[in-house]
């Protein structure tokens, strides 16, 4: 961490906490393709604080990504509505030239490949399906009026808006991706059942959930929160990319999806048919393939040279293969 950044962060935190503070430690947490996460230990007049500072990165994955200010408001509202979202401390408009916000640092494992494989998390994996369903039901119960800035909503059904947005984003890449177009065409020709619209997390999956010995400890990364079809959220953790090599376990590489779907249905009353769940699983793969292409272009354009971003370009091909395979196996 540079001295300039250290000074800027300490100054911003001093202003936020309105008193004399001492920044003991600030370490950048690896990972995160579009945002930085800093683990911060702070000494205040009231005692020590373990914080996480979420700071803007070099770009965004999708066009409807929330600003840091709005993401902070979402996390705060979710926490107040009983969701396992971290407690927030405030928004920082400028930390060394980029906005950020501050929240409590919750303990738990957040790296997906470790969540699905660590032997000591076996009991947590057994508990996660019902816990994930319960938290998702709470998220979908948040009143959209409490977050009026969220994208989404409108006269067209949510799935039609998603299809049109994804077409715009892949067209903006200005390069051929026939497998993605194939998936989008199938989606257009096979609309899902409708379940109304709710606040949805937008990236609810293993890798964005902190997991401790007893299971779920926090729901993170709310930058894609929007108003849409709740089944989009329900199906997102079923996408193969979020199984982290445990491909036979449909729910995020931790378990079959049956219990997860059953608990969600019981708590919300939404009886999800298999064709609709399949539609949104395919949509998730199409969305992630486009996200990979978009991120890789940040590297290839020279705007942000990064091995991580370059690797996402390679990953796009794997997701495109999954799209083709899913369409060939689509329920009749």
Image (cartoon, grey):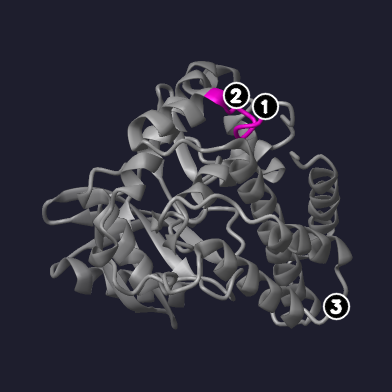
Residue 255 is tagged as: 2
Residue 253 makes an appearance in the image: yes
- Looking at the image, is 306 positioned above or below residue 191? below
Q: At which x and y percent is residue 104?
A: 30, 50
Part of the protein shown in magenta: 249-258
State the quadrant of the C terminus.
top right
How crowded pointer 2 is (Cα within 10 Å; few <14, some 14-19, many 20+) is rated as many
- Label 3, label 1: how far apart the Cα atoms are: 33 Å
Q: Earlier in the sequence, mark 3 or mark 1?
A: 3
Q: At which x and y percent is residue 8?
A: 37, 76
Q: Which residue is mark 1?
A: 249
Name the residue rendered at 71%, 29% in the picture.
246
Q: Which residue is mark 3?
A: 175
Name the residue rendered at 81%, 39% in the picture.
329
Residue 131 makes an appearance in the image: no
Tell me the element at label 1.
loop
């Amino acid at each position: 961490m540079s001295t300039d950044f250290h000074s800027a962060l300490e100054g911003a935190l001093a202003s936020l906490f309105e008193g004399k503070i001492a920044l003991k430690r600030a370490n950048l947490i690896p990972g995160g393709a579009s945002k930085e996460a800093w683990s911060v230990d702070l000494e205040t007049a009231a005692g020590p604080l373990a914080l996480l500072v979420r700071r803007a990165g070099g770009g965004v994955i999708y066009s409807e990504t929330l600003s840091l200010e709005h993401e902070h408001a979402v996390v705060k509202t979710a926490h107040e509505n009983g969701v396992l979202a971290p407690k927030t401390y405030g928004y920082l408009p400028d930390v060394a030239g980029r906005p950020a916000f501050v929240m409590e640092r919750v303990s738990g494992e957040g790296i997906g490949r470790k969540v699905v494989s660590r032997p000591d998390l076996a009991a947590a994996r057994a508990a996660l399906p019902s816990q994930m369903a319960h938290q998702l039901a709470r998220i979908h119960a948040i009143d959209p009026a409490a977050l009026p800035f969220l994208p989404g909503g409108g006269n067209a059904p949510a799935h039609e808006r998603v299809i049109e947005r994804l077409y715009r984003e892949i067209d903006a890449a200005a390069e051929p991706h026939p497998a993605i177009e194939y998936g989008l065409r199938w989606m257009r020709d096979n609309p899902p059942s409708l379940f109304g619209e709710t606040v949805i997390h937008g990236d609810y999956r293993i890798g964005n959930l902190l997991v401790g010995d007893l299971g779920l400890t926090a729901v993170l990364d709310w930058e894609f929160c929007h108003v849409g079809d709740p089944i989009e959220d329900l199906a997102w953790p079923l996408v193969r990319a979020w199984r982290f090599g445990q491909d036979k376990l449909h729910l995020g590489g931790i378990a079959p999806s049956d219990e997860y779907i059953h608990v969600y249905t019981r708590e919300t009353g939404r009886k999800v048919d298999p064709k609709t769940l399949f539609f949104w699983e395919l949509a998730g793969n199409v969305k992630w393939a486009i996200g990979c292409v978009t991120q890789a272009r940040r590297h290839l354009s020279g705007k942000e040279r990064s091995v991580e971003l370059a690797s996402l370009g390679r990953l796009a091909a794997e997701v495109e293969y999954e799209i083709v395979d899913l369409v060939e196996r689509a329920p009749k």
